């Protein structure tokens, strides 16, 4: 246990080191980052909080659709609770892997029945699959348009076709995955875990095509709202950069954050953002400043919403 804790501390320390090297190498500093955040115009922060709230609302609705589609919604999960828990998961995802953060928060917030907890985790993983599919498609389109120069109308048609095919094939993929896991782990005696996995995948295959389309559409809306935050922050903090190009790179940064390089992509994502912003026309120092400030401003907005939700919950319980 102690060794694992030390390993996590070192891993986190490596992430901080990456950010320090980035700031030093690009001619900025943590002091400049703090000064920038403190002096952020109120209008920008209000815009970020508003976009963040809308993003959390869409994320909560997306999980609600997935959870209901897998027959997991019970009386203890009102939509307000779903929204509050989703926001806490997103706040944790600023410094922990997003997949783990949402799973952990929803596990804790579920009822004490193990079956309810497994249902919450299963539907969380299921709706995250759609985010992954979207990130892969959108990141590929970004590279094809900005790096290769393929016409946008061709890319849009290809993206829509890929999304439709992958959504249709999802059920077949789940069945294939269930069969593969049964063969791999059944022989080792992991029957209890296997039974839980089979139950979750069985429920996932029962989600209707309409619900799948809703989940995917909500994933797209959520991505656009996050892109709006990138556009707003870049426009104010790095006005010489192409804010649209920076926003379009969001899926690429999202994929980097999923890779187990550092916790929540801490450091690795900032390097990615900096490279994108420099290529979009921002000075090196401004690029590093925006890259680091984006995460901190996003975390601050999520924290404001968490306090607000906590206060509203207290008033509702009075």
Image: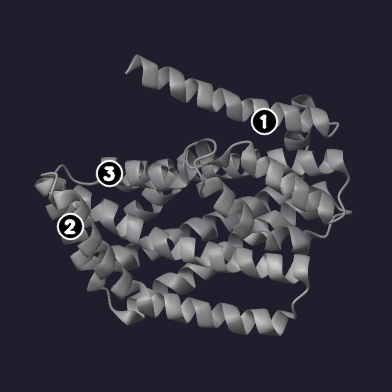
Mark 1 lies on residue? 18
Q: Quadrant of residue 60?
A: bottom left
Q: Label 3 to label 1, Cα distance in Å?
A: 31 Å
Front position in the image: 43 or 93? 93
Report whether 140 appears left or right of 286: left
Mark 3 lies on residue? 107
Q: Quadrant of the N terminus?
A: top left
Q: How many other residues sit within 10 Å of disc 2, few (<14), some (14-19) or many (≥20)?
A: some
Q: How many other residues sit within 10 Å of disc 1, few (<14), some (14-19) or many (≥20)?
A: some
Are dots 3 and 2 in contact, CB under 8 Å? no
Q: Is residue 224 above or below residue 9?
A: below
Of the image marks 3 and 1, the number of the one nearer the N terminus = 1
Determine the secondary structure under disc 3: helix
Can you tell which mark lies on residue 182? 2
Q: Can residue 40 be spotted in the picture? A: no
Where is residue 99? Give x, y as percent: 41, 48
Depth-wise, is mark 3 or mark 2 nearer the camera? 2
Are dots 1 and 2 in contact, CB under 8 Å? no
Where is residue 151? Give x, y as percent: 75, 81
| Residue ID at (76%, 67%) | 146
Q: Label 1 to label 2, Cα distance in Å?
A: 41 Å
| Residue ID at (30%, 74%) | 171
Where is residue 85? Give x, y as percent: 37, 48
Q: How many other residues sit within 10 Å of disc 3, few (<14), some (14-19) or many (≥20)?
A: some
Report whether 291 appears left or right of 196: right
Determine the secondary structure under disc 2: helix
Depth-wise, is mark 3 or mark 1 nearer the camera? 1
Q: Label 3 to label 2, Cα distance in Å?
A: 24 Å
Are dots 3 and 1 in contact, CB under 8 Å? no
Of the image marks 3 and 2, the number of the one nearer the N terminus = 3
Q: Is residue 155 above or below residue 173?
A: below
| Residue ID at (27%, 56%) | 122
């Amino acid at each position: 246990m102690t060794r694992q804790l030390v390993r996590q501390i070192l891993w986190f320390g490596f992430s901080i080191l990456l950010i320090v090297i980035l700031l030093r190498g690009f001619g900025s500093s943590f002091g400049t980052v703090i000064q920038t955040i403190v002096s952020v115009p109120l209008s920008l922060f209000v815009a970020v909080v508003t976009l963040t709230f809308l993003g959390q609302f869409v994320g909560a609705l997306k999980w609600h659709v997935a959870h209901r589609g897998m027959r997991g919604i019970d009386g203890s999960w009102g939509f307000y609770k779903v929204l509050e828990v989703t926001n806490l998961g997103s706040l944790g995802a600023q410094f922990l892997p997003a997949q783990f953060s949402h799973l952990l928060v929803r596990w804790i917030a579920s009822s004490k029945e193990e079956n309810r907890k497994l249902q919450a985790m299963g539907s969380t993983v299921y709706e995250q699959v759609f985010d992954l599919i979207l990130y892969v498609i959108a990141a590929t389109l970004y590279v094809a348009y900005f790096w290769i120069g393929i016409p946008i109308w061709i890319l849009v048609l290809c993206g829509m076709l890929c999304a439709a095919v992958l959504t249709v094939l999802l059920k077949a993929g789940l069945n294939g995955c269930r069969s593969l896991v049964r063969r791999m782990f059944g022989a080792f005696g992991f029957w209890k875990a296997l039974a839980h996995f089979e139950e979750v995948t069985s429920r996932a295959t029962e989600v209707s095509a309409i619900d799948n389309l809703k989940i995917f559409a909500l994933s797209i809306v959520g991505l656009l709202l996050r892109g709006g935050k990138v556009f707003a922050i870049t426009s104010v903090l790095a006005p010489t950069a192409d804010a649209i190009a920076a926003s379009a790179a969001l899926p690429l940064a999202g994929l980097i954050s999923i890779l187990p390089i550092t916790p929540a992509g801490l450091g690795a994502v900032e390097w990615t953002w900096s490279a994108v912003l420099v290529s979009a026309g921002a000075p090196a120092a401004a690029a590093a400043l925006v890259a680091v400030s984006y995460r901190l401003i996003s975390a601050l907005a999520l924290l404001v919403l968490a306090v607000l939700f906590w206060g509203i919950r207290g008033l509702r319980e009075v």
